[in-house]
Amino acid sequence: MAHRVGTSGSRKRCILGVDPGLDRTGYAVLQTDPIRIAEAGVVRSDSAAPLPGRLVEIETGLSDIIDEHAPELIAVETLYSHYKHPRTAILMGHARGVVLLAAARAGIEVLSLPATRIKKSLTGNGHAGKAQMQKAVAHALQLREVPEPADVADALAIALCAHETRTNAAALAGGAR
Amino acid sequence: MAHRVGTSGSRKRCILGVDPGLDRTGYAVLQTDPIRIAEAGVVRSDSAAPLPGRLVEIETGLSDIIDEHAPELIAVETLYSHYKHPRTAILMGHARGVVLLAAARAGIEVLSLPATRIKKSLTGNGHAGKAQMQKAVAHALQLREVPEPADVADALAIALCAHETRTNAAALAGGAR
């Protein structure tokens, strides 16, 4: 857990990457100057509990992280058109809706990134496999081990790609910050 | 719009049926003793706005209705496994997640009803078509015209079925109230 700081002035600039899921929502708070993980983990919901209560668990968990770190940007993966398991995808949609709601309630900009762009940004290959992505995340952040569980690695990859996207956009605009 | 009342003691017992959708979330507040529509309508979100803000519109709209009527039960349709348009279904999942979150945050029980049960409860036929369902809703509520748009008719059907389900459960339990 990151050290909780009292005022927004003393907070480091950071980006929050989120990989929403009903069972596990992976998150990664990435400080951007210099790049380091401030906090990363998983918000779990009780699979034995009714769905409305599980969504409250996800929303509360994410809002706590947002309150603590005050990210300047929240990044998620863009929806795609084809999912192998439609029912699971719809339940992911419930979790994603609650995550986006928490972001909007906190007044934080949301950046939605295509999976292929995230993969290409980390590995140079828009269709990289899971293991290759995990290794690339560990390499980019100079971690000794591959981050576990996979939801955390995914959230770190999203945050890293969001940071790169932002930096490139600033460079294209000819500009600082 | 229903008359806003100041204390929960003066409120009539009611059930809120909701048909969640990103563009339009149909809702129906059904008073149960005697049965009549207290309020029904649609919460719309601005299709030109970014998704997080649209979810805030849905959540705010639903929470206002919940606060005003204090329903004892919120009823929605159960998810099914096969949707014609998976991406639309996932976006519906975002709206449904936000609706269920609003219900849980208000501490109100959620009842999830299969589409076939709703149809059978209103028409006797678990596979009734949309027009047949709309006529059945108008008949059950002694409305002169079929409720429009379809989202409102769907929300009314859900609320009517939830009321029937509750009444039957109370009868089976040998029960008063």
Image: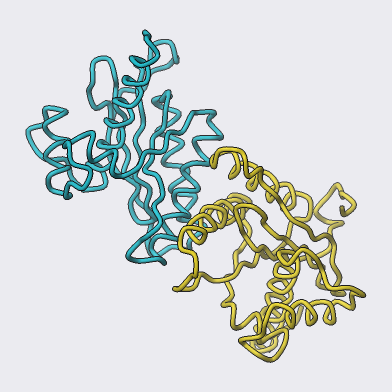
Chain colours: A cyan, B yellow
* A75 is higher (above) or lower (below) than A96: above
How many tags in the picture?
A: 0
- The residue located at (40%, 44%) in the rendering is A78
Q: Relative to residue B128, is residue A177 drawn left or right?
A: left
Indicate the quadrant containing the N terminus of chain A: top left, top right, bottom left or bottom right: top left
* A171 is higher (above) or lower (below) than B169: above
Instruction: Name the one closer to the observer, B66 or A135.
Output: A135
Q: Relative to residue B117, is residue B5 drawn left or right?
A: right
Q: Position of residue A46 (x, y in %)?
A: 38, 58
Q: Quadrant of residue B111?
A: bottom right
* B157 is higher (above) or lower (below) than B9: below
- The residue located at (80%, 65%) in the rendering is B148
Indicate the quadrant containing the C terminus of chain A: top left, top right, bottom left or bottom right: top left
- The residue located at (16%, 37%) in the rendering is A123
Q: Relative to residue B154, is residue A106 drawn left or right?
A: left
Q: Quadrant of residue A159?
A: top left
- For this orientation, the residue located farthest to the left is A144
* A109 is higher (above) or lower (below) than B146: above
- For this orientation, the residue located farthest to the right is B144
Q: Position of residue A140 (x, y in %)?
A: 15, 29
Instruction: Name the one closer to the observer, B170 or A123.
Output: A123
- The residue located at (64%, 67%) in the rendering is B75
Q: Relative to residue B31, is residue A175 drawn left or right?
A: left
Q: Position of residue B80 (x, y in %)?
A: 49, 73
Q: Position of residue B156 (x, y in %)?
A: 75, 70
